[in-house]
Image: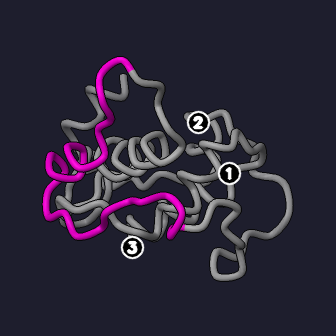
Amino acid sequence: MLLSAIFFWNMETRAFEFPCGFAYPTLLDIAAITGLKPLGDRYLPDTLEEEIPMTETSIVWDKKTYSAFVSAHHGEKGTPVTDSEHIAFLLYWLSACVFCTPSLQVPKYYYTLAQALHLKKKDLFEQVATCLFLQLS
């Protein structure tokens, strides 16, 4: 059903354009799709401390395309996946697949969410909702 709904997505208005009118995802829609709870502490992205500082991850931010970003963070075959590689993959996945950023670059502002996913934190609804609504606006 989600794949068929993508056909109606309008990149200019950031909404689904159906014959009956426009439809925007709500917080309850996000909660139903992701399974994350919309309850918890208030999320203030500017005050969130990084448990794994960006400087320690060796993530390269100057790559201009998704493929260059993936190539720069791809480890050697047969070696275990490092924390940096996993966070880099999550950054790519969030940018390209979840939030469908219009640019082909991986933005830094998904780092705290990628880090929280990497650390398997609970109560991520506020972060996901914030990132989604920033992307939609």
- Indicate which disc, 3 or 1, sits on the residue closer to the N terminus: 1
- Segment colored magenta: 54-78
Residues at discs 2 and 1 in contact (Cβ within 8 Å): yes
What is the quadrant of the N terminus in the image?
A: top left
- The residue indicated by pointer 2 is 34
Of residues 99 and 109, the one drawn nearer to the viewer in this rendering: 109
Toward the viewer: 101 or 109?
109
Q: Quadrant of residue 126?
A: bottom right
In the picture provided, is 55 more to the left or to the right than 92?
A: right
Tell me the residue at 68%/51% (across/down).
125
Q: Which residue is mark 1?
A: 125
In the picture of the structure, the residue carrying the numbered disc 3 is 137
- Whether 72 is drawn above or below 1: the answer is below
> Label 2 sits on what residue type?
Thr
Query: In front here: 136 or 104?
Result: 104
Kind of element beneath mark 2? helix
Residue 109 to residue 23: above or below: below
Q: Is residue 70 magenta?
A: yes
Q: Pinpoint residue 127: horizontal percent, then vertical percent.
A: 62, 59
